[in-house]
């Protein structure tokens, strides 16, 4: 969970040792989660964002398995030595840039607006914009 009750949250998604040096970017991989039960909402998805649009439950998800680069915003990069902690930040403002949620619809009438790769609700334009924004929305920062 990245945001709950309007507050940003920090979740550990991985850890390990990085060689000492100066970092300006890292690469990460999105993979479909197939280790869960098939009735788990995250099953077969690489990204899932749940919230509300115009009072209607909304799910935005991706199934793509892709490589992303998370860049450091500081031109000097991040100096890593000893126990330096870094974190990936998903900038929701950047992720939803140029996405007009006013046009989101629940075309199949199941009570949920779905914005995903299979266009269940006719929101493919919104999905395409979110997918196009994904890499620029992921940033690397010193914790």
Image: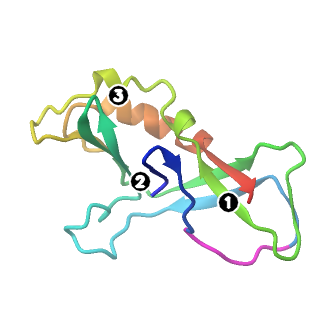
At horizontal 41% and vertical 58% (from top left) the residue drawn is 46
Q: Quadrant of the C terminus?
A: bottom right
Residue 125, disc: 3
Element type where label 3 sits in the image: helix
Question: Which residue is disc 1 drawn over?
Answer: 87
Question: Left of 143 or right of it: where is 39?
Answer: left
At horizontal 21% and vertical 28% (from top left) the residue drawn is 105
Rendering coords of residue 119 (x, y %): 24, 38
Instruction: Specify which label sits upstream in the sequence, 3 or 2.
Output: 2
- Mark 3 or 1, closer to the camera: 1
Element type where label 1 sits in the image: strand
Q: Quadrant of the N terminus?
A: bottom left
Q: Nearer the viewer, residue 33 or 109?
A: 109
Question: Which residue is disc 2 drawn over?
Answer: 64
Rendering coords of residue 32 (x, y %): 39, 63
State the predominant SS element of the stretch in magenta: loop
| Position above or below: 88 against 104 | below
Q: Quadrant of residue 11?
A: bottom right
Cα gap from disc 1 to disc 2, whole angstroms? 22 Å
- Tell me if label 1 and label 2 are in contact, CB under 8 Å: no
Instruction: Specify which label sits upstream in the sequence, 3 or 1.
Output: 1
Asked if residue 15 lies in the magenta stretch, the reply is yes
At horizontal 72% and vertical 48% (from top left) the residue drawn is 71
| Position above or below: 64 against 31 | above
Specify the segment rendered in magenta.
13-19
Q: Nearer the viewer, residue 41 or 69?
A: 41
- Mark 1 or 2, closer to the camera: 1
At horizontal 25% and vertical 67% (from top left) the residue drawn is 40
Rendering coords of residue 35 (x, y %): 34, 76
Instruction: Specify which label sits upstream in the sequence, 1 or 2.
Output: 2
Cα gap from disc 3 to disc 2, whole angstroms? 16 Å
């Amino acid at each position: 969970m990245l945001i709950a009750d309007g507050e940003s949250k920090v979740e550990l998604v991985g850890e390990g040792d990085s060689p000492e040096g100066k970092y300006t970017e890292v690469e990460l991989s999105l993979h479909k989660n197939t280790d869960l039960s098939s009735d788990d909402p995250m099953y077969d998805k690489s990204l899932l964002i749940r919230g509300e649009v115009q009072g209607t439950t909304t799910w935005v998800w991706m199934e793509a398995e892709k490589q992303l680069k998370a860049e450091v915003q500081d031109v000097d990069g991040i100096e890593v030595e000893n126990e330096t902690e870094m974190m990936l930040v998903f900038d929701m403002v950047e992720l939803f840039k140029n996405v007009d949620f006013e046009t989101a619809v629940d075309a199949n009438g199941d009570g949920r607006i779905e914005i995903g790769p299979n266009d269940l609700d006719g929101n493919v334009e919104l999905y395409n914009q979110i997918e196009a924004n994904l890499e620029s929305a992921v940033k690397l920062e010193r914790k």
